[in-house]
Amino acid sequence: MDHHHALLMLSVRDRAFFTLVDQDEQDNLYVSELSAQQAALARLAALVALDGAQVSYIHVVEEALSAGVSVDDLVGTLIAVMPSTGADRVVSAAPKLALALGYDIDAALEA
C-alpha cells in the first residue's frame, strides 16, 4: 500500500481500513508491509513507551520468539528506544521483559 494512502486512511480513521488492520493480526502484518520480526519488535517498543502490563510482555515475547526474533534483539530494542522513551520506561520494562523470557531479576539480585 502506498504510504500516502495509508497515512490518509489512518488520519481520517477510515472505518474500513481500521477494521482490516485492527481485527486480524495477519491482515495487520500484510497491510503494514513489515516482517513478522519487525512487527514484533515494534510492538515491544510500543509496550515500553506505554509502560505496558506484564501479561502484555508475555504475549509479545511469545509472538516475537515464534517469529524468529532473538533474545538479544528483544533486549537491544529496550536499549534502542531509551532516547525516545526515557530511562524510567526502560527500567520499568526490563524486569517485565526478563520475566517474559523466564529470567527473574529479583532472584538474580538476591543471589
Image: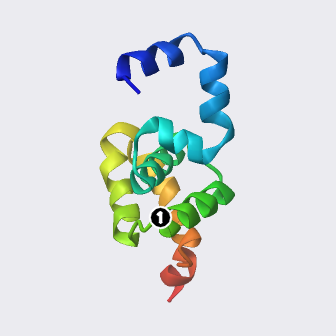
* 18 left or right, relative to 78: right
Quarter location, residue 96 = bottom right
Nearest to the observer: residue 37 or residue 89: 37
Which residue is at 38% across, 42% downward? 86
Residue 18 % position (x, y): 63, 25
Q: Position of residue 110 (x, y in %)?
A: 53, 84
Q: Amino acid at mark 1?
A: Ala
Q: In the picture, residue 59 is in which quadrant?
A: bottom right
Left/right of residue 15 with respect to residue 7 in the rendered view: right
Counting from the top left corner in percent of width and height, residue 94 is at 47, 61
The residue at the point 55 percent across, 40 percent down is 28
Q: How is the image coloured?
A: rainbow
Which residue is pictured at 56% across the width and 82% down the height? 107
Q: Is residue 72 left or right of residue 46?
A: left
Res. 96 visible in picture: no
Residue beneath disc 1: 67
- Position of 64 relative to 109 (above/below): above
Does residue 33 appear left or right of residue 60 in this picture? Answer: left
**Residue located 45% across and 37% down the image:** 32
Q: Nearer the viewer, residue 8 or 106?
A: 8
User: Residue 61 falls in which quadrant of the image?
Assistant: bottom right
Give the vertical position of 77 relative to 1 (above or below).
below
